[in-house]
Image: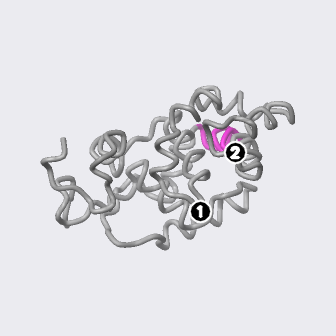
Amino acid sequence: MSERSRCKWCNLKNTAYIKYHDEEWGVPNFDEQYLFEMLILESFQAGLSWECVLNKREAFRKAFDGFDAEKIATYDDDKITELQNNKDIIRNKLKIRAAVNNAKIFLEIQKEYGSFREYLKGFTGEQQIIEVNKTTSPLSDVLSADLQKRGMKFVGSTIIYSYLQAIGAISSHEEECFMYKGK
């Protein structure tokens, strides 16, 4: 796996990270379940490394009911306390509460647009952007502002830029990387 040239940030000692880099990051995936999972995981990344979040992904999946937005939207204080006590995930109370809040808004957006993908399409036109060495863009600024206006938390422009990379709306593989698409 590691004989290929990859983006400098990819820790070649972490097989989960290599797999994520090679098979997910920058690869378009607009499955509703995946869109929600990445939104939740990216919000937990705030102030941390993606590798830290990725290493806890399976624990998150188990703790957050397989990233089922409908279930998460109904979490009560007891469930939030249970999550805060789960040593296998990131136990930040504000981020956990944001996940519950964001699940509700995600469902509202799905209802309004028919799917979250359709909502995103209004911003991206379903055209993949190829750019490197950025942490925000006009696209992430506008999408972040709209999500915040709707009441989502932990969706600043940098987090949303990372989210767009995760779902493949933006491909930021470095020029030396075997995944680089060029222009």
Mark sitting on residue 91: 2
Q: Residues within 10 Å of mark 2 (few under 14, many from 20)?
A: some
What segment carries the magenta color?
105-114
Left or right, residue 114 beside residue 176: right
Tell me: residue 14, above or below residue 178: above
Q: Quadrant of the C terminus?
A: bottom left
Q: Secondary structure at mark 2?
A: loop
The amino acid type of the residue labelled 1 equals: Gly
Mark sitting on residue 2: none
Q: Residues within 10 Å of mark 1 (few under 14, many from 20)?
A: few
Q: Position of residue 12 (x, y in %)?
A: 27, 50
From the image, give the main secondary structure of the stretch colored magenta: helix
Q: Position of residue 170 (x, y in %)?
A: 37, 58
Q: Quadrant of the N terminus?
A: top left
Q: Position of residue 112 (x, y in %)?
A: 67, 43
The amino acid type of the residue labelled 2 equals: Arg
Tell me: residue 80, above or below residue 97: above
